[in-house]
Image (spheres, coloured by chain):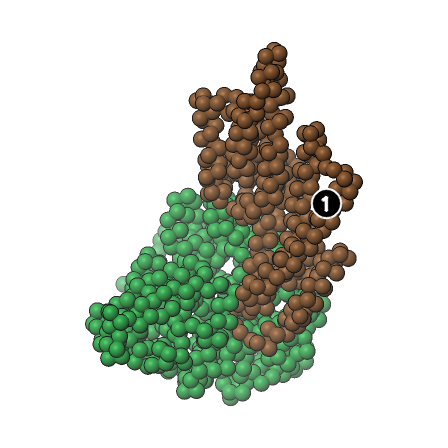
Amino acid sequence: MPRTVSPRIFAAAIVVLALVGGPALAQKQGGTLRIYHRDNPPSASVHEEATVSTNLPFMAIYNNLVIYDQTKDVNSVETITPDLAESWSWDATKTKLTFKLRQGVKWHDGKPFTAKDVECTWNKLLGKDADTFRKNPRAIWYQNVKEIALNGDFEATFVLNRPQPALLSMLASGYSPVYPCHVSTRDMRTKPIGTGPFKFVEFKQNEVIRLARNPDYFVKGKPYLDGVEMRIIANRSTRTLAFVAGEFDMTFSQDITIPLLKDMKSQAPNAICEIKPQYVPRNLMVNREKPPFDNAKLREALALAIDRKPFVDILTEGKGDIGGVMLPLPEGLWGMPPEVLKTMTGYGGDIEKNRAEARKIMESLGYSASNPLKVKVSTRDIAIYRDPGVILIDQLKQIYVEGELEVVDTTIWHAKAARKDYTIGMNLTGMSVDDPDPVFYENYACKSERNYTQYCDPAVDKMIDEQSQETDVEKRKKLVWAIEKKLNDDLARPIIYHDRAATCWHPHVKGFVGHQNSIYSNWRFTDVWLDK
Amino acid sequence: MGAYLVRRFFLMLLTLFGMSVLIFVLLRVMPGNISDILFESAGLVNPAEKAKIEKELGLDQPLVVQYSTWISGLLRGDLGYAYVSEKPALDEILPRIPITAKLAVLALFFSIVLGVPLGVISAVKQDTPLDYALRVVSLSGLSLPSFWLALLILMGFVHFLGWIPIYTDKPATIWHELALLSIPAAAVGFRASALIMRLTRSSMLEVLRQDYIRTARAKGASAASVNYDHALRNAVLPVITIIGIEAAFLIGGLIVTETVFNIPGVARFLVEAIRWRDYPIVQNLVMFIAVVVVVVNFLVDMAYVVLDPRIKYED
């Protein structure tokens, strides 16, 4: 029997819906969002940096061709929305990605935006422009781009050497803004010009970064805020206290660690704190080219000795995740399901059994409790690096390895790694896009400059290329997991654990959505408004 | 006196030259340079791009050439460009100096107005409960780490009492600025005041046992006159010396205080510049601090003449 709804109930439902949905319709214009910043960004040029310290304050100055939806908490192909491009399409061969560009968009200095700017930006990234970037950390992302072909002022085509469906995902990242042709790369580092919702006002070193609303922004009515102000406060206690005292509306991205969160909730009980994955996995660097870890058996013993759970329990109070290179499920799109994960060496089974097996290997190599293998565990002189290093040393004792923590000045860490001047290193690696292409190409491909451990296996390069061309997501996942297994077997920066942390804001901050699988792409502030 | 001043002037120049060589060499001895750090922050290693940056900044030049370029620029008033901000170093340093100077003067003022009178009282009231209490205060001032004290003060005044904000905005008025700076200044000045208090006390105790003090008392001078006109004037010389030294050391205390209280002065800026190996900023700032220290020491020496007529600098 069909059910009917009485007019009274229907009217009441409408009132309830209006009340619940009310705030979404009542965004207030004006006000300055005050966020604290944890450190001094190296520069304002997003393309030249690889840190959220630059993305967070400066992403809102720019526009991309496409962007991950700022109102949804997942970065995926389904949440990619138009930005400077109104639409996009692949050709039949999947080697040409054409963008139809918005017309009438102006740079903050009043000059018109055209397809030439798209061409200039990617020519700089490809090293084809005379005014090159001082640093180009994501050059490897675009190694498959043959050229940028223009068709008039408002159409640009990325011509690829081979199909690469993930290109669109990389272009939607906060790391892929379009730069103006007419501004030098030097000026983009110090006083950037964009087309974005906010204009650059000032960047005082170690003090403050200010952005002001772009009244000519091409999305009418947005942004809601008059400006964004980010004070740089290096001392964690001071900045947390300032947030609690109401000096700031919002904390820096994931600045509140799990242990700190309890304090935060007790001191600012009304604050909204969202715990999300950082996608900055803690990993090991094992020097495969020098003794003793040039011996594959020894590497296997090391892999068997690692118990990931204590890292998670001690350092993240159980909130962290165990996984491979790709962000673990459920937030990660490419994470391995438990049944696949446990098939990898060191991830499954009984840890005591694994360690007994590891000890047998060590004994066969001549090591014992009375004759341990002595190694240095090198790491940067920063707590988040040192702490897992200490736990690792404790675990290594179980298999006759006597580790000594070598704390390295943070300024020479990557250079030391590049010289292969280490035996074991405890490391952190930030992953900017939850897609296998940027993750694998940046960190494990032979040609990548960010592959500073210089792990190079042509077979792995081939596997990475193969998954990169695969358009079927399920098939691609299988290929990705095969790469994960291979990297783990090779001890190529094996992942120890994935951390989580919280970003907090006061209840009057509305419309902010933190992305669950990337910390680099949700800082446009177009939909953020202040209810005060 | 004239010849002494000339000698002193040349000695000051020599000291500054020594400082310039020392800071220049020490900075180069430290591991890594700006190009290492720029690449470090981007998490990549590219020797070719690194070499390009070093060439652009003149870091590929021999050390002697780099040193002479810096010193000749400094003498012309050209401090070069900051490596990180790519702005003139002078534009980065100048606006921060008044902030630190105000904080330092306030801290010194606090330490003197607290340290000297309490030291005198402690000496005059020797071995009384008041003396014991003041000695506990001075001992705690010397033993409490300044970062810890600063954090406690910050929690008390910002979080619980809400009397002062954290330095997040440029103060609108001089009174607002005074309010913002006085509490951090007190945190820094407390340690210095403890030292001054202890020195004033011991110096006063020594003087109060002198024959001329007994004579002054015998001729019927009042207690205040004996303590302040006769004793303090003679006891104050070592205190002046320690005030001079403290003024120089203050910058060290300000690094912690500026960091904890988030005050955008030169001390915190200097630490950040060292972290980034921003040579133009570090070299020029250290030279500025060296000039301040040398001048303060000179002024202290001159103050001896004014305060103690027995002291004369012979030609």
A433 or A495, which is in the foreground? A495
x and y, in percent, of residue A34 in the image? 55, 50
| Residue at the disc numbered 1 | B8
Helix, strand or loop under label 1: helix
Answer whether residue A118 is visible to the viewer in this image.
no
Q: Residue at x 56, y 83 (%)?
A: A145
Answer whether residue B123 is visible to the viewer in this image.
yes
A512 or A288, which is in the foreground? A288
- Colour green maps to chain: A
A229 or A443, which is in the foreground? A443
x and y, in percent, of residue A192 in the image? 65, 64
The answer to whether residue B41 is above or below residue B161 is below
x and y, in percent, of residue A79 in the image? 47, 69
- Colour brown maps to chain: B
Q: Amino acid at mark 1?
A: Arg
Q: Residue at x 39, y 51 (%)?
A: A261
The answer to whether residue B21 is above or below residue B168 is below
Q: Residue at x 57, y 29 (%)?
A: B116
Q: Is residue A284 left or right of residue A125?
A: left
Residue lying at the far top in this picture: please name it.
B220
